Structures are given as C-alpha cells and as structure tokens.
Image (cartoon, rainbow, N blue to C red):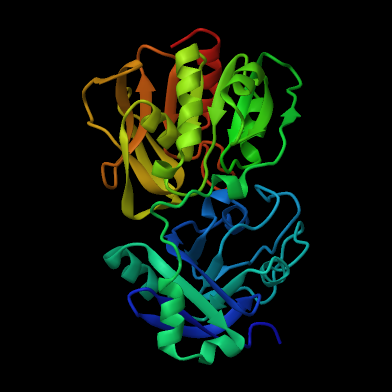
Amino acid sequence: MEGTEPAVLVLEDGRAFRGRSLGAVGATTGEAVFTTAMTGYQETLTDPSYRGQVVVMTMPHVGNTGMNDEDPESRQIWVAGYVVRDPSPAPSNWRSRRSLEEDLRDSGVVGIRDIDTRALTRHLRDRGAMRVGIFSGSRASDPMDELLAEVLATPPMAGSSLTDEVTIPEPYLLPAHDERFVIAAVDLGIKSMTPHRMNERGMSVNVVPGSIGAESLLALGRDGVFFSNGPGDPAAADHAVSLVRACLEAGRPVFGICFGHQMLGRALGLGTYKLRFGHRGINQPVQDLRTGRVSVTAHNHGFAVEAPVGEDIDTPFGRVRVSHVCLNDGVVEGLRCLDVPAFSVQYHPEAAAGPHDAGGLFDEFAQLMGGGR
C-alpha cells in the first residue's frame, strides 16, 4: 500500500513532525515554505521558482483532481520536497492521468503526509522560513542529531544562485498568430503560461536562456524584453541584473515579474532583502497606487525590493516610483520607471490557478512597446 513507510520532518531549529511517506522514499533537504493556495497544486509543483524549497500545503486535502498532461508550467516537478496533511486516496477528474502520489514518486520527490500542517505553518510564520529535511523509510529511524546535522549542512536560500539550474539550455520561438511585436523573454525560471499570455496579445516570444549575452538579447527582443520569475536570492543574480541594465541603456521596453521585478530593482540601484516567511498563494491583495484599485493576486517569492513609497526615486536611469504595494504587510509589489520604458510587479499575472485580476499587465507591456506610457 502506498504511503505506509514511516517519515519524519526535521526543522533546523530542532522541531520535528512524524508522519508517513508521500512520493519517493528517501531523504531530501531544502528551505521550508508554505503556500496558502487552495487549488493549483500542479502549478505549484511545476513552478521553477520553488527550486530548492520544501513546500508545505496549508490546504489539508490535496490531490483530489489528480495530475494531468495539460497544466504543468514547465518540463518537470521542481520542489525539493512536499508536505501534505491528507492527500487524496482516489483522484477524480476527467482530465486526470495519474495520482499525485505517482507523479511525486516517478519524479523522485520525497514528501511527507499525515502531519499537522497547521502547526507547522504557524511555526514557520512565528520563526520564519528555515532549512528542513524529510527522511522516510529506514532514514526515519536514524538518530535525530544525525538528521539535524544533515539539515544544518544544507546551504541557506540567502546567497543561493539557482537560475542556471532551471533555465533552458537553448532559445526557442513561440510565434503569435497575429504578430504585432517580437520580444525576448529571459528564462530565469519561466512558467509556460507566460509566453502564452503574450502570444494572445500579438507578441511573438523568443524564450532565451538566463546565460544569454546582452547583444544577442537585444537582437532577439527587438520590440521589448521580458524578465521572468525564478528561484534563489536576487542579490546573487549579477548576470541577470547586467542584462536589465543593457536593456535600459538601449531604451528597450522592459517588463519584469517576481524575480524579474527584483532584477529591475537591482538594475536601478535598489536593494533587496529576505522576507520572514515570504508570500506564496493566490489570494494576496495588492493595491495599484496609481489608481487605488485592489487586485487579488498570485505570489511566490521569499525576497522583496527595498524602496520608499510615495515619492520619486532618483536612479541612474531617471526617476522611479513604487507603483504597487501589498496590503497585508506593505511590501513593495511594483516599480514603474518615469523616464525610461520599464516597469515590473512582484506577483504573477499569468497564474492559471489564481484569479485574472492582473492579466491587464500584459496589455500595459504591449502599450509600452507601442509607444504609450
């Protein structure tokens, strides 16, 4: 019977939770984070931004609709580990091809089930995201001090550069049916829905590796350049920052989301910092300070841009203003350049599992490339 092996989850501060195995049996370590999304677990699993992270689902029942072949956001499952209180024993959906358990096992993802995920989430909210290990099968009975030592040997997320682990090796083109613009999308951990949303608006998209040179990037993105979401510490992504600066210097329209937003911030000379437990879910309220409009948005980030709100910021590329803030905690959620054609948001306007409040940002990118501000 699946999921009958013993398993234990060990946090770096020594707290442990015992349950049963989920997916592959063995050991894994990473950064423990939680997501508040009630749906879209397949999108979460295949989001490259979760590279190196053990994801705790706050929704207790996960896997009800199984796993299909239409909804993956990338070529594989990226999470380092998976934590669920009560996975579905019998998925039911007309598109389902496999169970959650099967896909986790076949992808080699070590998980744990039957633990108190509410208690674990409250612990992470109180203490902050931290390193964690999941050990199942025979590893679950290893001495606790040995398991804790393995967790503490795991590199922390702060300072980690992970773009090279998730980006594509070679560029590819996704042509638009009714082409209006040709852009380059820098894959820092891009989700497949993003180029699709741009195709819908007449953008032919050259998806390019994060390692691309500035000259090649500008040649492929003749009308504009998009910088995607992705994993890791933005302070460690110097090459991506240099690409943004090259675009700004060339006057090429720039749009960044999530990690790409942080890259724009750094290119403008702003700092970044690690959030206590991050924003992960599809229910985050964000206010557009230009209009006062509030959108419910999808997030997946553990770092943020540091910038003053409510004033023009002088940068090497002219004036910049914070355009969006999170209403939960005041975190900067958007930047808009006033003297060069560039803007960014911290959240995910493409999110298939979330609402569509933010879809108009792709229209703003088109308007920017068309000469509007």
Left or right of residue 232, residue 181 in this image: right
Picture residue at 44% right of the left edge, 74% below the top: 151
Question: Where is residue 315, by image quadrant?
Answer: top left
Q: Let me know if residue 257 appears in the view.
A: no
Picture residue at 42% right of the left edge, 56% below the top: 157
When the figure is inspected, residue 5 is found, relative to residue 48, above or below; the finding is: below
> Quadrant location of the C terminus?
top left
Q: Let me know if residue 363 appears in the view.
A: yes
Left or right of residue 267, residue 105 in this image: right
When the figure is inspected, residue 12 is found, relative to residue 364, above or below; the finding is: below
When the figure is inspected, residue 138 is found, relative to residue 283, above or below; the finding is: below
When the figure is inspected, residue 203 is found, relative to residue 29, above or below; the finding is: above
> Quadrant location of the N terminus?
bottom right
Residue 238 image offset from top left, x and y in percent:
45, 36
Residue 62 image offset from top left, x and y in percent:
57, 67
Picture residue at 51% right of the left edge, 17% below the top: 253
Residue 319 image offset from top left, x and y in percent:
30, 16
Picture residue at 71% right of the left edge, 50% below the top: 75
Left or right of residue 75, residue 350 in this image: left
